[in-house]
Amino acid sequence: MNMKKYKADTMVNAMKKVRADFGDDAVILSSNVVYSKGFLGLFKKKSVEVIAGYDTPKEQVERKVEPMIMPTPNPKLDESTSQLKQEMREMKKMLKTMQHSSKMGRFPDEFQPILTYLRQQGMTNDVINEIGDSMFNYVKETKEDLPFEKQIEHVKRFFERRLAELPFGGISLEKKYINVLGPTGVGKTTTIAKIAARVLLEKKKKVGFITTDTYRIAAIEQLRTYANLLQAPVEVVYNAADFKQAIDKFADLDFVFIDTAGRNYKEAKFVEDLKEVVDFSLDMETFLVLSVTSKEEDMSVIIDQFQAFPIEKFIFTKIDETNSLGSLFNLMRNYHRGIAYYTNGQEVPEDLEEATQENIIDLLLEGVSDARPS
């Protein structure tokens, strides 16, 4: 095995040098972070030392061996080779993780606790580096210290700037039809009942329900239970003609809440089926419900499928079931949509919060005090 030591300011640059010499099949044998002296103990210059190795290519070995003798199959050798390949795949994954960590490692040590907290919350690397750069530039320009409490305020201001142009808050009460979309299992029915209960009890308005979820009997019965408690009518619709009849029947109501079918909307077919039943040309507000316990990648796929719909804002459910809320910020930032409500329990109508910029930022930083250095 050929081995060589590399030194660079970041792991990313070190890996570039490794790849330039050995390619993508290089093996990292060791890596160390080395600090140089800094000014007054601050802004220590950090560098990375990496020792990389590379086995002699198979074709070179074969050219040296004459004559070529076909090896006898060896099950143990095959198993060992398979295990080695698996280890190489895991090594490559580890290298990618090290690359991300090295970007964060370029910031002063006093910034690391809050940046680590943001990473644990699920913030993207771009966001974390942007925040780190912002704090570093502040210290560099003002020559002032930035203790932990001020770092928190700095991060709050960052979120405020990034969310400033996004809409927050519940239904406008200006449109009669409130349409709620989303995949199965996110809590659409309970959420729509909570919103309707608020409108009925606080605004003294007449409400009714339409459900297109004819695939699950339990969902219809759940909505009927809520409707009975609110003394509100319910219509179950199977097609566009049923939907129109329900609209006509509810002509005298103030607000009509539409509970759409919960399906696997990663499949475009189900999205098209929805278009054939619900008349989106009505005077309607449409919200997309997502569960924060879902993977961010899965939520992004759902949002992409619904891009053709006039989604006003997101509604996030199950806030109380996770300690990682970075996906809220990531999705708002990526899709330029705010949040109408978030839910934090099953009680109707209590466990429903109307979103504001302030309380969303508070959620994002709710556990940050636990990251304070001791």
Image (spheres, grey):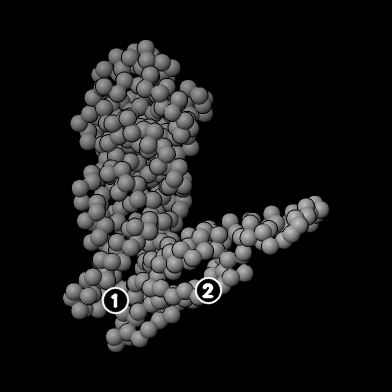
* Residue beneath the point at 30% across and 23% down: 280
Provide the residue designation for mark 1.
147
Pick whichever of labels 1 and 2 is earlier in the sequence. 2
Looking at the image, which is closer to me, 294 or 41? 41
Provide the residue designation for mark 2.
4
| Quadrant placement of the N terminus | bottom right
- Counting from the top left corner in percent of width and height, residue 301 is at 42, 39
What kind of element bears circle 2?
strand
Apparent side of residue 133 relative to residue 371 in the rendered image (left or right): left
Looking at the image, which is closer to me, 260 or 97? 97
The quadrant in which residue 247 appears is top left
Instruction: Decide: is 290 above or below 21.
Output: above
| Quadrant placement of the C terminus | bottom left
* Residue beneath the point at 36% across and 71% down: 106
Amino acid type assigned to the residue bearing label 1 in the image: Pro
Q: Which mark is residue 204?
A: none
* Residue beneath the point at 34% across and 61% down: 128
Instruction: Decide: is 324 above or below 318.
Output: below
Is residue 45 visible in the rendered image? The answer is yes
